[in-house]
Image (cartoon, rainbow, N blue to C red):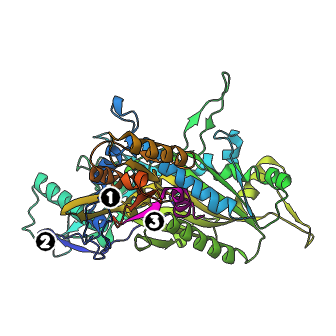
Amino acid sequence: MSLRPHLTLGFNIPLKSSFVIPTSSSSLTLTTLFSTTSDPPSSSKTEDAYAKLKMEDLVGLCKRRGFVFQNSELYNGNSGFYDFGPLGSELKSNIKSQFRSQFIHARSDVVSLDSSIISNPKVWESSGHVGGFSDPMSDCKESKKRFRSDQLFWGPVKDEKGDIVCWVCVHEDDTEIMKKEAKKMAKKIIKNEKINVEGRTTIDISTFKDLTFATESDIQNIPSPESLKPTLTMPKDFNLMFSTSVGASSTTPAYLRPETAQGIFVNFKNVMGSSRMKIPFGIAQIGKAFRNEITPRNFVFRSREFEQCEVEYFIPPGDCWKEYHKEWLDFSKNFLLSLGVRDDLMDWDVHSGDGLAHYARACTDVTFRFPFGESELMGIAARGDYDLKAHEEGSGKSLEYYDEETKERYIPHVIEPSLGVDRVFLAIMCSAYAEDEVSGEKRTFLKFKPSVAPVKASILPLLKNKPELVEVAQKLYDELKMRWNVDFDTSGAIGRRYRRADEIGTPFCITVDFDTIEKEGKTVTVRFRDSCEQIRMPIDEVMGFLGKEIDGY
Ligand code: ATP
């Protein structure tokens, strides 16, 4: 359910002007050290490759390297659903296990929960989801396309005297892209309708509003982005919950949960009673959520089935929420940084006024600059006592907390950090994307932090036809795979194997060569993905070295 305030844009677009989409001026420099063995020396300077990365390239990369596939591709797809491949499922699982270790295990005040996806439908009535978990929807009567009304922006095209020439309506997007689209649409409409403007027409998109602000008479003028004619219907609410039926004889619909949070609220008493938690304390849950999004788009950013990591942190009533909210903002941001989400691409979006849900005291989103624009990555909300009160009223059972120290009874208030695993996945892919030059050749690689990298190390015998090397490498691989997802690669020249590992973001390559078996000290080479630096290390120390690099101990 979108809590975002409406967009306001302020630009004058002369129809004949050209637009330049600004790219980030920041640049990254990789320090490349010379290798001690057979890795080609690399000298590299990296511009910020991400600034040039297009969404379709990222989608292609995810498919090619086995991170994400379109669901049911064999049957021409299934809009809004994705399958995570061998590397994607590892990366996702690493994000979730980092959440578990940082938000739950490392804190003595948070415990975990794994509640069911389908609940008694009364849960969703009390929480307000049956009545209000909806987005506004408009249909195009001609093309039969369906739109989220708050994602369509419309406004007039005027001439120099301020008279209206025609109207345009474009999809919400990056400001520059919206300007381009508005200009394109105006040109087409002017041509189709044979309107004489003599090239002086301007589009002032600062006056654009989203379609939910359209009146019955406005809708007669607003063109559909598909038909270019006023064929849109007035916005109406569309409930985003997927319904299903439970059992053979059920008459009332049940719902697939649209968020994990409600499972936490309805178990508040159970968890508190069974785990002797005292306020302040939190319950965290990691799990699937389902929303029948009207227009799933931007790859896994907005899908119909996704995963959430949520914490409901219960606190006393009163002003203390401000302090807790601030604490969770910092904690959440540090978590994202620890996963390798780039700081320079993140920002805060503080909700206020219209953008704040009526029951919320505060809500701040962490946003990320994706290739399609800046959007919400996670939200940290102060929700007051709205949820527990709603379930107390709905169930008729007390959800009060008795504070033994102050002898007070109250309904706890709550701070809710909530993140989408799929969006964090996308932000990590974007943050890790890098290009440089190694030995005169362009290299594309993924700079994953070792803790989230899908494959932690690649074990390489220098030559595949030397059983004495293969045997030692195989033994090392067998030991390491008991603890991490590691790879064993024997095929091709060593340089090509390094490059394969770089492409999928494997942080370390460990090569067993003749020094390993012939010389005292039994050393292997350890090659670092980002710098291409290589060092030698006794084979017995590899496990300890990787432990420190990957797990921090
Ligand atoms: P939006 O405004 O983008 O629809 P929201 O404010 O409705 O998001 P919440 O209900 O606060 O999102 O959900 C918490 C988190 O769950 C979001 O910050 C996001 O990371 C994730 N999320 C929500 N909807 C989706 C979706 N359709 N696909 C993927 N992740 C999602």
- Give the residue number, with chain letter if any, for mark 2: 17
Q: Main secondary structure of the magenta part?
A: helix
- Mark nearer the N terminus (3 vs 2): 2
* Figure label count: 3
Is disc 3 placed on a helix, strand or loop? loop
The image position of residue 103, as x and y in percent, is 64, 62
- Given residues 207 and 495, the one toward you in this image is 495
For marks 3 and 2, give the CA distance.
Answer: 36 Å
Q: What residue is at 67 percent from the left and 77 percent from the top?
A: 322
Q: Which mark is residue 371?
A: none
Q: Which residues are magenta?
A: 534-553
What amino acid type is highlighted by mark number 2? Ser
Badge 1 is on which residue? 445
Q: Nearer the viewer, residue 412 or 389?
A: 412
Relative to 252, is 405 on the left or the right?
right
Q: Nearer the viewer, mark 1 or mark 3?
A: 1
Within the magenta stretch, is there residue 98? no
Q: Is residue 269 in view?
A: yes
Q: CA distance from mark 1 to mark 3?
A: 16 Å
Q: Secondary structure at mark 1?
A: strand
| Cα distance between the residues tagged 2 and 1 | 38 Å
Numbered disc 2: secondary structure: loop
Residue 73: horizontal and vertical position, in percent? Answer: 35, 34
Amino acid of disc 3: Val
Badge 2: how crowded within 10 Å, few (<14), some, or many (20+)?
A: few
Residue receiving disc 3: 341
**Amino acid type, callout 1:** Phe
